[in-house]
Image (cartoon, helix red, strand yellow):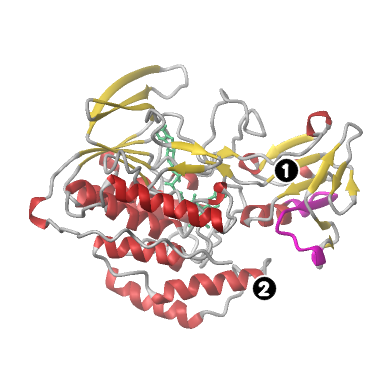
Amino acid sequence: WSLAWTLPVQVSKTVMYNSRSSRNVAVIGAGAAGLVAARELRREGHKVVVYERGQKVGGTWIYDPNVESDPLGLEPFRVIVHSSLYDSLRTNLPREVMGFRDYPFVAKEGRDRDPRRFPGHWEVLLFLEDFARDFEIMELVRFETEVLHVGMEEGKWIVRSRKRAGADRDDLLIDSDEVYDGVVVCNGHYTEPFIAEIPGIDSWPGKQMHSHNYRVPDPFRDQVVVLIGSSSSGADISRDIARVAKEVHISGRSIANETIGKQPGYENIWLHSMIKSAHGDGTVVFQDGSSVLPDVVLHCTGYKYHFPFLDTHDIVTVDDNRVGPLYKHVFPPLLAPWLSFIGLPRVLPFPMFEFQSKWVAGVLSGRIVLPSPQEMMEDVENFYSKLEAAGWPKRYTHKMADYRFEYNDWLATECGCSVSEEWRKQMFDATRRNKQARPETYRDVWKDQNLFSQANEDFLQYK
Ligand code: FAD
């Protein structure tokens, strides 16, 4: 079913180009969202500091062969490994769709570059590094500086951070508190695992892990694996593992009854319904009545929004993976525009980050005016009521299946920008259809040559 995007509350919009205010703004995170947020905030005239706990820009796209000590990612005091990338990962969107509006992700020549339309993960990191260099964002970033606490005092935000001074873990740690007018949260949403609940799993003797800690298939050699979930990562990882494993059994909510059984084209992959229970004798039983004796259960079940540093006195909460209340997934009505979130909706990431960032920057300067807190709250409540009426669970609040482009176009219009290009919308849909028809080869076999040509013609204006 499709969920109509809630229309914005109608308010008069006074655009005050001549009275822009410059604010002191902290951005948390130097992934794709933080980088473009920093660019837009500075373009708008704000003073920006980007806090990044890692040593480089790029966030998710920095492949880390290390995994966490707890393979399920539940231990609260574990050392966090930020990225969930696996070694074989190629993008699931064509580069033309993925790139920023005015900084397209075009193929570049160079020894380490990957010119494919669906490149390997390292090419995305190189693209983000190019972006940071070309827009001189590096000078705004404080590396190895983790934000520990963000709280409000007398109408300002106090950001407490910890900088590691030196190369080793045991080196000097320097804590400091700094005061900002605004905080823009860009900490990424693919690090804190969401685990499937399985009746009886506590007495099941096998090994469990989450895809956050999956890197390469070798540890699964000759093993029987139950993989839960059929998202992009689940689909990629199941094929990766099937190259070496004895059996791979995929269990998922979206697996249609008529496809249950051996997956065509594979000797060792089976599709199942949801898991019914796990047992002390090692068996895992599916709702369709079949059962297996796996060595490993691999949860490819997604991630939780997590803001361990944020203290808003419960004005913003995460409830069943709904971050709220947030006006258009960005501003908490009672704290707007001084607190904002970039990147919560899980769709077409980079262009959306860019539109959201332009919006936040313009609102902070006073160039774009928000509705009143009451009006924003009303809009949020209407949106939640629509989700509820449609039977959409809370945890899918930021999943914008059928109105992703309406959302981006709404943001673009708020910011006075042109809406998403027609070729981008069509290419996104063409990719989705192609992926369904050719899940194994959609990255290399495609038929949207005309859209590809249109996109590249369009990109010439940004050279
Ligand atoms: P991140 O890239 O996660 O960056 C967040 C940054 O915040 C990190 O650098 C982190 O170190 C920093 N940080 C966090 N907490 C703190 C703190 N307390 N203090 C200081 N710094 C902090 N998108 C696509 O467009 N195409 C794809 O093909 C695609 N494939 C994906 C595959 C996988 C497996 C995953 C997990 C995601 C994929 N995505 C894809 C989505 C991807 O997450 C986004 O493209 C995007 O990179 C997210 O950017 P971000 O800035 O929101 O978060």
Mark positioned earlier in the residue sequence (2 or 1)? 1
Q: What stretch is highlighted in magenta?
A: 241-259
Q: Residue at x 12, y 50 (%)?
A: 20
Q: Which residue is drawn at 40% across and 55% down?
A: 127
Location of mark 1 (residue)? 298
Locate residue 209 relative to residue 36 in the image: left or right: right
Q: Is mark 2 on a helix, strand or loop?
A: helix
Location of mark 2 (residue)? 437
Locate residue 287 relative to residue 463 in the image: left or right: right
- Residue 351: in sight, yes or no? yes
Residue 315, percent across and down? Answer: 38, 34
Which quadrant does the C terminus fall into? bottom left
Label 1 amino acid? Leu
Label 2 amino acid? Ala
Report if residue 221 lies within the magenta region.
no
Residue 159 sits in which quadrant? Answer: top left
Residue 256, percent across and down? Answer: 76, 63
Mark 1 closeness class: few <14, some 14–19, many ≥20 residues within 10 Å:
many
Q: What element carries label 1?
A: strand
**Disc 2 and disc 1: Cα gap in Å?**
25 Å
Mark 2 closeness class: few <14, some 14–19, many ≥20 residues within 10 Å:
few
Residue 200, percent across and down? Answer: 82, 34
Q: Residue at x 41, y 31 (%)?
A: 314
Q: Above or below — where is 320 with respect to 120?
A: above
Report if residue 243 lies within the magenta region.
yes
- Residue 263: in sight, yes or no? no
